[in-house]
Image (tube, rainbow, N blue to C red):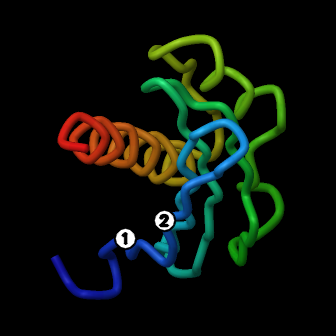
Amino acid sequence: MTDRHVSKLILRYKNPCDKSYIYVDSHIVRTLNETLLIEIKDKKVKLLDIASFMEPKEYLPPKAWLNQFYQSEKVDALTGATLTQNAIKSTVLKYKSIDSILNDQS
């Protein structure tokens, strides 16, 4: 794996209002950058937003697909944007795991 495919945590912020954590992550989807904003509280995704998406617009997932992360661990496949789907799913899973580990220790 080359360094350009590694996901990078840009920021971890504790929201003092509701004790959630906000993560900002930047990574390469296919050949270009994507930046996600993920808010997690009580091991659940509270917010998922694509802050930056440099790939072609046809690979951008619809809001309805992103909203699945709020209700379930299982997310439907995204036809025509497999790399985007995989990048988002793995990033969300990674930060849910990190959040769980860090918050269980505190």
The residue at the point 74 percent across, 51 percent down is 49
**In this view, the mark in front (1 or 2):** 2
The residue at the point 58 percent across, 40 percent down is 19
User: Callout 2, which amino acid?
Assistant: Arg
x%, y% of residue 41? 54, 31
Q: Is residue 68 above or below residue 31?
A: above
Disc 1 element? loop
x%, y% of residue 90? 38, 45
Tell which of 36 and 1 is nearer to you: 36
Q: Is residue 74 above or below residue 99?
A: above
> What is the distance, in whole Å, between disc 1 and disc 2 at their CAs?
14 Å
Instruction: Read off the residue under disc 2.
Output: 12
User: Callout 1, which amino acid?
Assistant: Ser
Tell which of 57 and 16 is nearer to you: 16
Count of numbered tags: 2
Residue 68 horizontal side relative to residue 75, left or right: right
x%, y% of residue 20? 57, 41
